[in-house]
Amino acid sequence: MLKERKWVVMDRRGGFTLIELLVVIAIIALLMSILMPALARVRKQAKAIICQSNLKQWGNAFAMYFGDNHGKMFHNSVPGSNKNNNWLNALRMYCQPKGGVTCCPEAAKPLSEGRVQYGTFSAWGKAGSTNKWFEKGDYGSYGINAWTHDRLAPPHVAGDELNFWRSSNVRNAGYAPLFLDALFIDSWPRHTDEPPVYEGEDWATSGGMRRFCINRHNGFVNILFLDLSVRPAGLKELWILKWHRTYDTHADPPVWPDWMREFRDYVTAPAGP
């Protein structure tokens, strides 16, 4: 008679060896090194899309203002004389300029007390304070192309009164910037303006293109145009947009500083208004 065989199954279950753990950790680290730049790009793209959405909401505010004022833009006043005429107050009944949609997500933090330099990733204004430009609690990181106003009192330069768009009813308004990423609430670009010498350069007391030529979106800024369309524009493209009625979109471009040379070039001027 055959003997009954008994099979003994050894329980070999146990933890990982040190070498196995090191291999797994190395693989995870490698995957993270690959994924982190991609995730960072996705986050920046998401912020750029939110920025464009904010500008579309401001487009709705401008549309309501135009509808209530026969397509006319508001006047602009010299600082300290009548701030009710700047866009913050002209559009206040349609959209509050107190952070939120007034801020690009890349520049949502207002300046701290005592700081005087406006940076690429900081908002203008100081929440809780007032001055000759802002009401209490106003802050943001968008600004208006001041040439879109109905008029300026008084003009900066003799003859400038001829440059203002004055209304939204202009030909090829899709090439005329209205409202965009900015270091301050407004600016007066001219085709002779020089770009910032280095990235994030403070514009100090000067206006011009430097308040708008900021690298918030990987070589682009987001713009709401006079036709109320929104799209990104390359930093070098800013020099060939139609900022005011006599702006020369065919002028020779400036000498680009080192920090801008890698950005896309734009050699064809648009069919301006």
Image (tube, rainbow, N blue to C red):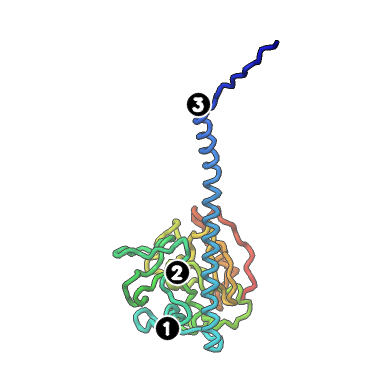
Q: Position of residue 202 (x, y in %)?
A: 39, 62
Residue at position x 39%, y 68% in the image: 124
In the rendered image, the quadrant that contains the C terminus is bottom right
Dot 1, how many residues are within 10 Å of its Cα: few (below 14), some (14-19), or many (20+)?
some
First in sequence, mark 3 or 1: give its number.
3
Among the two numbered marks 2 and 1 on one chain, the one whose residue lies closer to the N terminus: 1
Q: Position of residue 232 (x, y in %)?
A: 57, 64
Which amino acid, by three-letter code, is at mark 2? Gly
Q: Which residue is mark 2?
A: 100
Q: Which residue is mark 3?
A: 17
> Picture coordinates of residue 46 (x, y %)?
54, 59
- Looking at the rendered image, the disc whose residue lies closer to the viewer, 2 or 1, is 2
In the picture of the structure, the residue carrying the numbered disc 1 is 85
Q: Is residue 235 at least partly visible in the picture? A: no
Tell me if residue 225 comes above or below residue 10 in the rendering: below
Residue 34 in which image quadrant: top right
Residue type for callout 1: Asn
The CA distance from mark 3 to mark 1 is 73 Å
103, 119: nearer the viewer:
103
Name above or below for residue 191 compared with residue 22: below
Question: Mark 3 packing: few (<14 Cα in 10 Å), some, or many (20+)?
Answer: few
Q: Quadrant of the N terminus?
A: top right
